[in-house]
Image (spheres, rainbow, N blue to C red):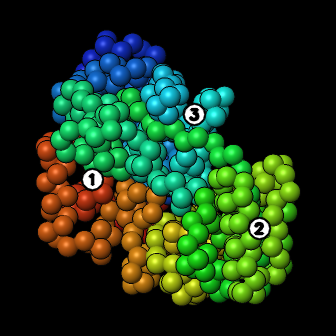
C-alpha cells in the first residue's frame, strides 16, 4: 500500500471539505472501516469517504482526489461479491448512495433517466403505475444500486429471456478519471461512433463513475405463470432444463436448486418447496394468455419425459410471490448455517451442468466444506455457496482453495469465469486461465485510454498489479490463499 503522510491526508481532506462541505467528507475510523469492504470476503482501508449529492460534486471529488495523485473507488450499495469496491492502495471511496433519484420517465419511449444510487427494485416500483419495470433483477435487487448493476453488468433470474443489464442501458453520463464529464451512448436508435456505452457497462469502475443513466423500461407482461417442478434425481432436473430450451422455449426465468438448498431455503422462507426432492426447478413464462398456457403445457410435457415427480403451477399471485421469495432469499437463508459463506459465480454449458455439479460436490467434500447450489440453470450460471466459520484457523484459506478448484472445473468444462458478479479482486488473478497474455495486454491498453494513471479503481480485473504485501489488506487472511497468485 502507498504510504500517505498525515500532512498529505490532511491536505486532501481539507480540499475536499472546502469544495463539498464537511457533511460530504468522512474520515472517522469506523466509517472508513465500513466502506472498506463490499459483500465479498475481502477488505482494505480507504483514506477517506466522500458522499457526493450530485454529478458536479462527483466531478469535483474526482478532480481533487486525482489532483493529489490519489486513487479513487466508486461504490454503490456495497452488494458486490467479487471485491470490486474494496479500496486498495488507500483509495478514496466515492459513494453514490445519496444520488438516488428517478429524474425523468418517458412513458412513450419506454425509458427513464436515473441517478446511480437508485435501488434496482425501487426503480421498478416507481414506474409500476405506467405498466413498466426494469427487467434485470439480481437476487439483491431490494438493496443493490443501478450504478453497481451498470458496473458489473448484473444479471438475475429473468435475464434468460430479457438479457443482462447491458441490454437495458441506453446511455451513461460518466465522470472520467481526469474529472471531465462525457455522455456515452444515447437515446436515439443508432447513436453514432463506437459503442463506448457497451464498453463502460461491466467495466467495474475502472473507466470512471456513472452519474446519470438512461435505462430501457420493459412493459409488464399481461399474463405470468410460475411453475415448480421437483425431481428425485438432479440429472433429471438438468435434462429438463436442456429439454425446455431444445423445444424452442425461452422462459422468462429458469432456476434450479439442489436438495441442500431447498432444505435451507424452506426452513427460512417457508416458500412451499418439497424438502424431500433432490432438485427443484422454478420456471416462469410470460406473455399473452394463450401463448403462455401453451408454454406451460409444453414445459410440463418435457418435465414428464424426464421423470418429474410433481408439476405445480402457482394458483395466484400470492403463491407465485411465495415461490420467488424462497429463491430470492436463498443467500440470506445460508447465513443461518454458519457465520460466513462464500458465494461463487461461474458459467458452464448447459450440457455440462450435472458433470460440473458433481465435481463441485467432490471439491467441497475433499475440503470438508458444506456446499449448496442455487443457479440460473437456463444459461448455465452456477452459484455454489460454501458455508464456513472464518473464526476457525485455516478455514478461510481452505474455502478459497476450494473456490479456485471450482473455477478450474468450470473452465475445463468450457465455461467462463463469471456470469454476473464480475472479476474484481476475487478472480483478477484467474484471468490468465481464460485469456492469453496478448488478450490481457489489449484489455489493459483500452483501459489506458480512459485512465492512463491507473487511479480509477486500481488493481482490479487485469492481473499484474499490487500483491498482498503492498495492496493494503487490513486482515491478511480475509483475502484467502488463492485470491492472489
For mark 1, what is the residue?
459
Q: In this view, does 60 lie above or below 384?
A: above
Element under label 2? strand
Q: Which of 292 and 305 is in front in this view?
A: 292
Whichever of callouts 2 and 1 sits on the residue coming sooner in the sequence is 2
Q: In which quarter of the image is the C terminus?
A: bottom left
Residue at the image position 30 percent from the left and 57 percent from the top: 461
Element under label 1? loop
| Residue 478 position in % (x across, y down) | 47, 59
The answer to which quarter of the image holds residue 132 is: top right
Residue at the image position 21 percent from the left and 26 percent from the top: 180
Q: Which of marks 2 and 1 is in front?
A: 2
For mark 3, what is the residue?
123
Q: Do the residues labelled 2 and 1 touch (CB within 8 Å)?
A: no
Tag on residue 412? none
For mark 2, what is the residue?
228
Q: Do the residues labelled 1 and 3 touch (CB within 8 Å)?
A: no
Amino acid at each position: 500500500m502507498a504510504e500517505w503522510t498525515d500532512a498529505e491526508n490532511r491536505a486532501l481532506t481539507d480540499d475536499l471539505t472546502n469544495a463539498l462541505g464537511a457533511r460530504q467528507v468522512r474520515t472517522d475510523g469506523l466509517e472508513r472501516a465500513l466502506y472498506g469492504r463490499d459483500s465479498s470476503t475481502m477488505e482494505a482501508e480507504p483514506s477517506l469517504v466522500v458522499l457526493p449529492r450530485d454529478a458536479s460534486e462527483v466531478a469535483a471529488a474526482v478532480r481533487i482526489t486525482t489532483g493529489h495523485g490519489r486513487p479513487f473507488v466508486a461504490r454503490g450499495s456495497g452488494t458486490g461479491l467479487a471485491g470490486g469496491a474494496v479500496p486498495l492502495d488507500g483509495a478514496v471511496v466515492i459513494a453514490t448512495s445519496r444520488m438516488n433519484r428517478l429524474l425523468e420517465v418517458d412513458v412513450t419511449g419506454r425509458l427513464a433517466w436515473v441517478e446511480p444510487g437508485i435501488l434496482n427494485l425501487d426503480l421498478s416500483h416507481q414506474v409500476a403505475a405506467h405498466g413498466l419495470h426494469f427487467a434485470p433483477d439480481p437476487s439483491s435487487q431490494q438493496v443493490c444500486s443501478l450504478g453497481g448493476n451498470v458496473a458489473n453488468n448484473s444479471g438475475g433470474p429473468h435475464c434468460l429471456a430479457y438479457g443482462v443489464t447491458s441490454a437495458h442501458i441506453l446511455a451513461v453520463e460518466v465522470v472520467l478519471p481526469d474529472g471531465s464529464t462525457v455522455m456515452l451512448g444515447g437515446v436515439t436508435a443508432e447513436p453514432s461512433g463506437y459503442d463506448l456505452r457497451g464498453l463502460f457497462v461491466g467495466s467495474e469502475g475502472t473507466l470512471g463513475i456513472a452519474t446519470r443513466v438512461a435505462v430501457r423500461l420493459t412493459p409488464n407482461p399481461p399474463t405470468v405463470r410460475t411453475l415448480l417442478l421437483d425431481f428425485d434425481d438432479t440429472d433429471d432436473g438438468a435434462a429438463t432444463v436442456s429439454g425446455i430450451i431444445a423445444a424452442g422455449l425461452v422462459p422468462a426465468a429458469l432456476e434450479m436448486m439442489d436438495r441442500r438448498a431447498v432444505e435451507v431455503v424452506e426452513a427460512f422462507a417457508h416458500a412451499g418447496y418439497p424438502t424431500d426432492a433432490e432438485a427443484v426447478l422454478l420456471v416462469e413464462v410470460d406473455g399473452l394468455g394463450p401463448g403462455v398456457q401453451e408454454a406451460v403445457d409444453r414445459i410440463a410435457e418435457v418435465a414428464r419425459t424426464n421423470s418429474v415427480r410433481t408439476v405445480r403451477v402457482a394458483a395466484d399471485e400470492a403463491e407465485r410471490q411465495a415461490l420467488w421469495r424462497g429463491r430470492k432469499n436463498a443467500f440470506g437463508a445460508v447465513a443461518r448455517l454458519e457465520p460466513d459463506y462464500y458465494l461463487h459465480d461461474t458459467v458452464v454449458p448447459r450440457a455440462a451442468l450435472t458433470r460440473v455439479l458433481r465435481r463441485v460436490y467432490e471439491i467441497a467434500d475433499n475440503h470438508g466444506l458444506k456446499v449448496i447450489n442455487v443457479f440460473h440453470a437456463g444459461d448455465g450460471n452456477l452459484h455454489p455457496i460454501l458455508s464456513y466459520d472464518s473464526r476457525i484457523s485455516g478455514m478461510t484459506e481452505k474455502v478459497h482453495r476450494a473456490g479456485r478448484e471450482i473455477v478450474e472445473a468450470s473452465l475445463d468444462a468450457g465455461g467462463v469465469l463469471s456470469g454476473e458478479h464480475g472479476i474484481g479482486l476475487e478472480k483478477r488473478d484467474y484471468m490468465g486461465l481464460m485469456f492469453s497474455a496478448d488478450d490481457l495486454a489489449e484489455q489493459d491498453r483500452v483501459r489506458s485510454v480512459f485512465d492512463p494513471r491507473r487511479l480509477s479503481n486500481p488493481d482490479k480485473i487485469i492481473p499484474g498489479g499490487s500483491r498482498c504485501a503492498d495492496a493494503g489488506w487490513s486482515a491478511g487472511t480475509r483475502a484467502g490463499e488463492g485470491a492472489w497468485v
